[in-house]
Image: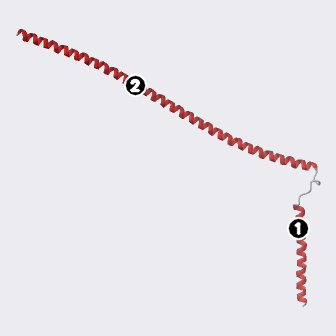
Amino acid sequence: MSAESGRVERWVKRFVVAVIVLAVGSIVGFLVITPRPAEIESAAVLAAEEASLRRSIDAYAARYTGMAENYLAGSHSSLRAMDAYAARYTGIAEHYAASSESTQRAMDAYAARYTGMAARYTTKSHSSQRAIDAYAARCNGLAEHYAATGK
């Protein structure tokens, strides 16, 4: 029975040591994790921490402001590029519209020229027809004259 009681005593000692180690670890962990109260810290330390926090917030604000300005400038340049393309294509369209108008004017000028030429040659053909009719009347007159005289 003494062998069994020695064994139990060892287990009890181990258990007590384990409980003591856990208790000490818990107390140390509690002291390390718990923040120190503000009354213990000096005013200079608190002011320095506050200033550091303010600087980091200002740095983040400046960073995000810079990013916003960068993206805004990018969108403005995109808008300027689109406006430039629109102006370019508007100019090209106006150029070709003016070109087609001048082409239309040229075609109208050619039509007027050919209409004038047709009118001129039509009047010439009328005068040629009159000349042919006059020539035929003269020849008929001569034929009648020679037929009447018998020569």
Q: Residue at x 69, y 42 (%)?
A: 70
- In the image, farthest residue toward the left: 150
Which one is nearer the viewer's eye here, 8 or 128? 128
Q: Could you say where residue 29 lies in the image, as x and y percent from the top left? A: 88, 65
Give me the C-alpha separation between circle 1 and circle 2: 105 Å
Question: At label 1, which amino acid type do we have?
Answer: Ser
Give x and y (percent) for residue 40.
Answer: 94, 54
Q: Is residue 13 above or below residue 81?
A: below
State the residue position of label 1. 26
Q: Badge 2 is on which residue? A: 108
Q: Position of residue 133 (x, y in %)?
A: 19, 16
Residue at 90% x, 65% y is 28
Residue 32 in the image: above or below residue 61: below
Asked which quadrant contains residue 25, the reply is bottom right
Classify the position of the C terminus by image quarter.
top left
Q: Amino acid at mark 2?
A: Asp
Which element carries disc 1, helix, strand or loop?
helix
Figure check: 21 above or below 129: below
On-image quarter of the N terminus:
bottom right
Q: Tell me the element at label 2.
A: helix
Packing grade of label 2 (10 A; few <14, some 14-19, many >=20) is: few
Which residue is at the far top? 149
Residue at image location 62% in from the left, 38% down from the top: 79
Name which quarter of the figure residue 139 lies in: top left
